[in-house]
Amino acid sequence: MQNAPILIIGMARSGTTFVSNMLGSHLETCVVSEPHLLWRTGNLCFLNDQEFTINSFNKNIIRKKILDKTGYIRRLVEKSPINSLRAELVHSVFPDAKIVYLERDPVRVIFSNYKRSLKKDSFKLSIIIKKYFYKTGSKDLPHSLSSFNLISQLSVRDIPCFLLYVIKMFALRDIFNLLPFGPKIKDFKNIVKNEGLLRYHVKVYKETKLNKKKFKMLYKDNFYCFQMEDLMTNKEVVMNLFKSVELGYDDIYIDEVMQNINQQRVERAIESNKMDDLIIEEIKRLNV
């Protein structure tokens, strides 16, 4: 299906932004980047991302609002890290999609999330303003910018729950210091409080791996898995990415995409850290 929506799935810090910018450089696509509030339509009563209800109203609102951004002319490229925990909801909204599932060295992705948690980047006001009131994307690649402000995402019937949700999340962040970065698994408050941030992010990684199996089962031949490190360095893998989602390309175009990859970012993505051994121990302890 050449016009199928392209959904980029992966744990936060696994390369979803990198790949959305890469695919967003294509003239046939339109990027919708992290409409997290929209994906929570009808489910703002839950603070975590693993619990949700699926009904015709919720899924129709999400699908229509996202596709409206493309004008029904260009191919949709959408990425939302929270969806790495909600395969069933994603499939109910876009059963016709092609899934690009991103993986990254587990030690690096866990450490990156842990570091962002230490910085208290979840529900950080500057990030909220950027994501919900300004365009997001990469200026290095053309046609990869998208905008989806808060008002256009929020359903009228969700306003009371939204206000309560915001109050609770800011309290968890600024008063109790229990708000981790990235997708939130069930009981995240108690896990962070009793087991610490590092183990929490290892548990998130484990849950995303379980959901990866669900995505693969639900989407079958329309599920494609790529390693972020390979996409940053290997031209043939990049070509396979575009081929998998049925976006036309030639050698000149792929060369331009590769030239726009920030080499300093590539080096930082694989850089080791003194916490690596501790993370590996936690991964083994939790049997990830």
Image: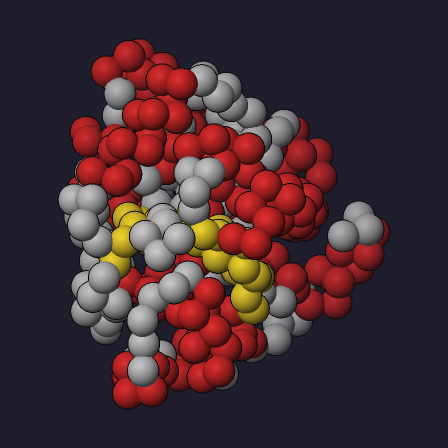
For image coordinates 52% across by 53% down, the residue present is: 222
Q: Is residue 134 above or below residue 66?
A: below
For image coordinates 43% across by 77% down, the residue present is: 239
Q: Nearer the viewer, residue 242 or 227?
A: 242
For image coordinates 18% across by 50% down, the residue present is: 73
Q: Is residue 187 above or below residue 277?
A: above
Q: Is residue 11 above or below residue 103?
A: above
Q: Nearer the viewer, residue 211 or 166?
A: 211
Q: Residue 186, located in which quarter of the rendered image?
A: top right
Looking at the image, how many numbered discs can be counted on the residues? Answer: 0
Classify residue 279 as left or right of residue 28.
right
Q: Is residue 211 above or below residue 11?
A: above
Q: Position of residue 221 (x, y in %)?
A: 57, 54
Q: Nearer the viewer, residue 7 or 208?
A: 7
Classify residue 70 as left or right of residue 110.
left
Q: Position of residue 132 (x, y in %)?
A: 24, 41
Q: Position of residue 189 (x, y in %)?
A: 59, 30
Classify residue 19 as left or right of residue 207.
left
Classify residue 279 as left or right of residue 56.
right
